[in-house]
Amino acid sequence: MLTRATDGGLRGSLCLSLVVAVATAAPAMEPKSISVSLQAGWHVPSLLAETSEILGSISSSLYWDFLDRIASLDGPSATDEEQYALAKQALEGLGDKAGPAVQSVLNYSISLEYFAPRLEMFTQLSASHIQEMVNADPTAASLPKCVDPIFLFNSNWACGLSDFKQKLSIAAQTPLKEHTNDALPLSAPFDFDRTVGAKPDGPRVIVYADITSPSFRQAHTYLRSLAASGEVLYTLRPGVPMLAEGEKGVRLQGYGVELAIKSQEYKVLDDEIPDPDGDKFELDSEAITSSEAEEIEGFFFARLKERRPELSDKLDVLRGDLLAKVEEDASKVQVWDMQDLGVQAVGRILRAQDPLLALRRIAQDFPMYAPGLTKQRVNQTLKKMIIAFQKEFEPQSLLRVNSVILPTDGNPFDLHNTLISQSAAVDGLRALGLPPAAVRELMLSWKLETDSEAMAMMGPQGDEFRLDVEIGHEAITWLNDLESGNYPYSRWSPSVKEFLTPAFPNQLRFIAKNLYRCVALADPLSSHGLAILQTLRSLVQQNAPVALGVVFDLRRAAREMVDDLVDTKCAGSWPQALEGAEWARRIESKCKENAANSPTSSVHRAVAFARLFYTLRNHEAYGPTAAWEFIDGVASRATEKAPRGKITRPKLVKAFRATAKKSSMKYQKEIEKAFALGSHPADPWIQSTQEWVTRKGLQNKPVLIFNGAIIEAESNPEFLRRGLMNYILMAQMRYQHAVYHTRVTDATDLNEYIKNQPRTYPRMNKEILKGANEVELVDSVSPPEGVVYLPAAPTASGDKKGEFAALTVWVVSDLSTQEGKNVVAGALEYWESGSVEGDISSRIAIVHNPGPTSTADPPLKLALSRLAESPEGLAMLRALIVTIYDEEMLGEAIEALVKSKGSVSAKSIPNCQGHCLQAYGIRQEESSAICNGRAVKLSTSKAIPRKESDEVFEDLRLLHVHMIKFLRLGELLKAISGVLTTTEPGTQSDRILRITHRLAQVPRGKAASGAVELPDEYIDDGIGKKFENVIEFSRPESMISVTAVLNPLTQEAQSLAPLLVLLRDAIGASIKVYLSPSLGISEVPLKRFYRSASGAWETEAGITGAISFTPSGSRKGPDLLKFTNIRTRALLTLNVQAPDGWLVASTRAPVDLDNLLLKDLPSSKMNLEYGFEASLIEGQCIDKEKREPPAGLQLVLGNASSPHLQDTLVMYNLGYFQLKASPGVWRLRIAPGRHGSIYKIDDAEGSTGKEFRLMPIDSFSSKPKMVQVTRRPGKENVDLLEGGGDELDDAGFFGSLSSFFGDLEGKKKKKKEKNAPIEVGGGGDTVHVFSLASGQLYERFLKIMMQSVVENTKSKVKFWFLSNFLSPQFKSLVPKMAAKLGFEVELVTYQWPKWLHRQSVRQRVIWGYKILFLDVLFPLSLKRIIYIDADQVVRGDVRELWDMDLEGAPYGYTPFCSSNSATNGFRFWDSGYWKNHLHGKPYHISALYVVDLARFRRIRAGDKLRSIYDNLSADPNSLANLDQDLPNYAQHTVPIFSLPQEWLWCETWCSMETLPAAKTIDLCNNPLTKKPKLDVARELLPEWVVFDERQRKLTAEIQDAESASSNKAS
């Protein structure tokens, strides 16, 4: 093996001379270069607009400050270069608000064109909004021609500032106009709007403007003054000019391109050689040079040329030879050579001059480097080190930027968001005076609670919060105890090591430990609650491996007592047993109002039920078993005679007698005691139970609490069992992981382990408990003017002055109302408790939030102000509020207390009005708590507050605990302990408040499922001393630190490596990459070349993030995505790997991208172009009442002028739907007609019957939409699908397959449905044919198939083609071909949903599209379609198939024929698994089939096929012929009608004698001859040659006409 060149000298010269001489003998393949670009049809955004949006993503105040600076500057802004200079000048004026950290990533953000969709949305929104205004006001007809800023306000409009001033003065004198949502919905505020104004409820002025224009600066300055004075709310929607015809749009970044090596068992290449001139192909004018800095077989040619320039030519020859040798050796790599390929790759990377570039090069061009790598000596020391590393950190990928864990899919948009937020945090911390070392420490070590940490083992959802149920609390009645030693648990393994024994997938482990605890909260007197209780008992009887408990929820009974107390006794102890003091007082109050009514003689039946249950459970002769028999008896009697479904006193008595009579209990006496008004031994337990329910904050509906995770309890017992089983299986997987890593052992206290899981809290409140990315922060943490903090409470420990309080809480409420008194009582209870949790204390201030009719200084405010310095007085004030209920008496008591304990000189507590409300985002009179920049609405009641479990008190405690975890205050205080001072009281708290607010604004990344965080020591400097499998580039001054773990021979490494290089070279980050390859490789790990467009500029000096300009002042776009000097003779397929939600298509390609041979390229350089067609609107649609998808519901997308642009239906699979749209604001509606008459969109806009939901598209990565629908009154039980199909019995993510495998034919047969007349588009006479193709050869076949169909079919024909894989030439040609041959054509597209298991091989992807999305691929008006493979020739009239009766089946296929005995050995379906599975049914061929789309959708066949596919495709060995195996496998659930045999003839399976009768001939592959399909067609089908010649001439004729037209135009 050649050695690496050294520093010159004799040895190097001799070596070079020898190698050069040898090299000249072998010819090298000419290297080829391919460039790819992706453009959108939008104008390139202005630099000023992009910069403002970038700053706006950090904070609204920064956005407005930047625009203020722009408006105040006089510089020109006509060109990009002038705008860039103006933006830099404006940024300098912002000082620390946009410091060096933010400015360092601005260029990268601009290069990504990250905000181009948002600005394009504003452009489209402007056009739509103006059209709305014209429709509403005909005098606005001239508005679309306005070139000045456009003002829309108060249902008025203005063009230019002077027009606005005039109309605003007139509008001020007239009342506000009302407008309906139907007329001007775009005038309403959107979440994406940025609005400024001193009065939150002031009149809104919406401005559409190009912010580069001088007229905008004047308009902005004027409106800012109006907004500051409270006269208007100013909303700016900046746009960009529309794209002119022929003008190229913005070049996009953020995607990848692969050259995948294609297996070629059968020939798929066309024998027609494309004419480059005919494609008008132009070579890439940009210089494409290879990087000679790359190492090739140990040589660095750039360095050698630098040292020996006189050998430059010979070095080029040597380099070419080595590349040719690499290419030649690539085909000789054997399986046994790959054993240590990963270690060999790591060794090569670490030895390189620039290891990071070597990582990128080897990962992205691995097929070229594999042969050389296998010849390297394996470094055994390095291998042992990698093994040791993987023992400490599992071999999986990780990307961490500072403290944020990101997905490892190489998405630059995720990285962009993190860099922007991290940089903003760095500048913010610097502005607070923190030294660089402290800032760096904070950015590295401090992080919010991340989603990856929440991936605990307590449920399937990693981002859910959990409740500490207090396992030993008396409120919980446990049904079983797996650790009791009783049968059958005594027979189970007592050790958690059972998790590590081999078992089948999803097989439950039966371990005698309470690993899973499930508590049900249920109303025992509701049918729903009784069903839950019975289900839990059946689970115990079936020996489910879960500890089950129940808590009786009697809140409904308590409400009924309050509402029905006309005849209830006012005195007695039992009300307190239900809800504590509050209910007692409410009852007493109501009784006094109805004192004339006579009392009843018994308690509420719910109390009696609980007392009877308690009596049986605690009786020595009965116990828990009898108590549960009593519940069974109650449930069985619930459905007895009137009132059916209601538990009455007689039914309770009967159930108790049936249970109690089995013993000597005097049950009649116990019954009387249970219904008596006096006290009962069970009352303390009942009261404790209801206090537990209230304290836990649980909603008033049945729930299951599984290891703390809250699950809505289904009333259907089967759904309940399956949902619980899903949680158990997911938890079991995480327990296995924990046991393997010894985090759980036999000695582990499981109760404590469950209690201490991440995101476990003592109370539930969805307003407070939100994920890191869901928490909304206020704009400012400047305290209300004159804020007064309460002194340390008498019970507080530690610092008495509150100097070290890490949490600052401002409690805001209207102190003149009863609600305000409740809030004050709860706040003072929180204060009095010490407001300390985990050694972290808080300081608290109370702020008055007066309503429009409230007084500015109510008595309670004055009392709080006077008592603010008296801890004793504040404690007494709280006692008065919760003790005295008479308003007059309370006022007198407070007045006396103030005189006794108050201070005349005390400061008055502040009012929150105007700017205060706006800054904190709260409304007048609203009760909220603002804690370290987070505003939370408090749970309040107008009732008198409870003494022991006040809602406000519990909420404040919960907020305290959550903020400690959310902000990681413990770690934070350690990190900044060195910079805190103690000079003034409260200084530390103020500083901590500002620091935490700044840090909390950093969005959290979300790690890939199952990702595990690196220990901190892996991130600290110096870890490389322990492990040498690390690439490290340290920059101590950098505030961006990146840590990654990568297997270098994976697709993740191919996409991540370029980003790591960008972070180092363009952003200046510190980089640390641990290389963790797979060991024991047995197959080629990477079979593709890969490049990504990551948004950087690559120069001779390396990657840079600097923006450069042309001499005319226009900015240069980022480099094209390039494959340079690729050498391989393999057949390749070029695929664009676009981010989820992008629909892209090829627009310029001179060669067959599906079957690419580099040696046959017409030139050494080639430029390919793709276009961005649309973004996806995708999401989930749920029936709000039933909490399940409204399967089959038809949705329509459009706008005001065109309400129906496209449609789709809701899948049963997750309720998923998908629609296409360009940036803009769209209207989503339920399809009018039957579907619209049954359902309506919840919280929609528009008038009745015309409801719609506005759907903005403003980013490259829009989030899935949640659409809730409700049934219209009277339609609750109407079948949406008109009697459609068998209900799916799914559970969990996709549902159990058990419902799919029932034999439909074994069920009662339904009457066969005759095909109704088809009415689609042009009428029922048109036959619709679907097909798809990929590659030049199959497009050639497709043109022949179309001709054969049209020529042999008497009816009109319309073809539908999937555009995803068609070439731009074909898509341009086929409409013209349709016009000449007399058929119609339409292209459809669909993106594979990310939740559905994806295929990686292109052919299998095509097969998937052929079968998986038939229900959603076509317009809903299309009722039937015929699929015909592209490589078929049709001899019959397909109208016969169109009219064929499918006898109720959703589709019809032709069975494989069996007349060719020569291929009997290949008929796999005649024996083994398939024979047993088919049960005598035929195995059908998928080359042709007829689909009754109406029936297919009605029985939800698509949902069933997708569910079966998703389960089977998890096994890579299943569904070998996906499009064919899937429908055949599923035909017991989705029946197939067998078409007559003559409708598909194939040489492989059919005899030659049957060929004359064939109506279609399929050019299927023959495993005996393996003849190319072209040869088979020419030999068998004489008409094929005729059709082929005809399509060739027709294609040439169309291309000649296009060329002549183009020449004439030019």
Image (spheres, grey):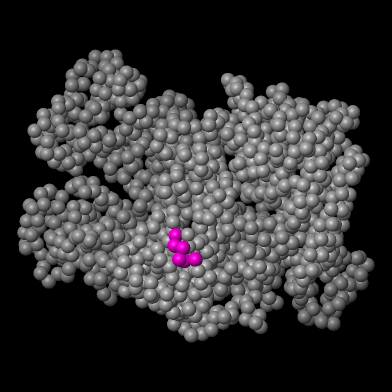
Specify the quadrant that holds the N terminus: bottom right
Q: Quadrant of residue 182?
A: bottom left
Residue situated in front as seen by the camera: 329 or 609: 609
Q: Quadrant of residue 1372?
A: bottom right
Q: Residue at x 53, y 51 (%)?
A: 1203
Specify the quadrant that holds the C terminus: bottom right
Residue situated in front as seen by the camera: 1052 or 153: 153
Q: Position of residue 499 (x, y in %)?
A: 53, 38
Q: Which residues are magenta?
A: 136-141
Verify whether residue 847 appears in magenta: no
| Left or right of 879 on screen, residue 653 | right
Please, is residue 332 above or below residue 861 in the view? above
Q: Position of residue 678 (x, y in %)?
A: 14, 29
Please, is residue 162 above or below residue 1318 in the view? below
Q: Residue furthest front?
A: 139
Please, is residue 1340 above or below residue 70 in the view? above
Q: Position of residue 1576 (x, y in %)?
A: 89, 41
Residue situated in front as seen by the camera: 560 or 1225: 1225
